[in-house]
Image (spheres, rainbow, N blue to C red):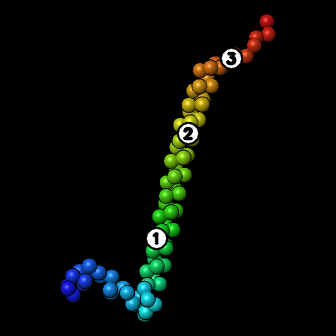
Amino acid sequence: MDFVMKQALGGATKDMGKMLGGEEEKDPDAQKKEEERQEALRQQEEERKAKHARMEAEREKVRQAIRDKVRFSHFPPTSAPCDS
């Protein structure tokens, strides 16, 4: 019966003390690891924003080319009037 109870609870009993307000194991390098993780996240976000800006600039070039093409096809350039 004891085996069945241990099997049913699994690893939950290991963390039971933490859930009840007991001592939590402290990692001496936890703060350093968290700072490194935050820095990596900031760097990834900056890279993502830079990539997005480059892609948006390229899209704007394509949009402008289409605008120019449509404008010239609907309104062909006129020659200067002659004074005769």
Residue 61: assigned label: 2
Instruction: Tell me if mark 2 has few (under 14), some (14-19) or many (20+) residues whose alpha carbon lies within 10 angstroms of its own.
Output: few
Q: What is the x, y in percent for residue 72?
A: 61, 23
Q: Is residue 26 visible?
A: no
The amino acid sitting under disc 2 is Lys
Q: Earlier in the sequence, mark 2 or mark 1?
A: 1
Measure the alpha-carbon separation of dots 3 and 1: 57 Å
**Foreground of the two, 8 or 14:** 8
- Which residue is drawn at the image coordinates 20% and 85% (left, top)? 1
The first of marks 3 and 2 along the sequence is: 2
Mark 3 lies on residue: 78
Look at discs 2 and 1 and give the one toward the viewer: 1
Say if mark 2 contacts mark 1, CB within 8 Å.
no
Q: Is residue 46 above or below residue 17?
A: above
Residue at figure coordinates x 47%, y 84% from the top left: 31
Q: Position of residue 83 (x, y in %)?
A: 79, 10
Residue 43 in percent (x, y) is at 49, 67
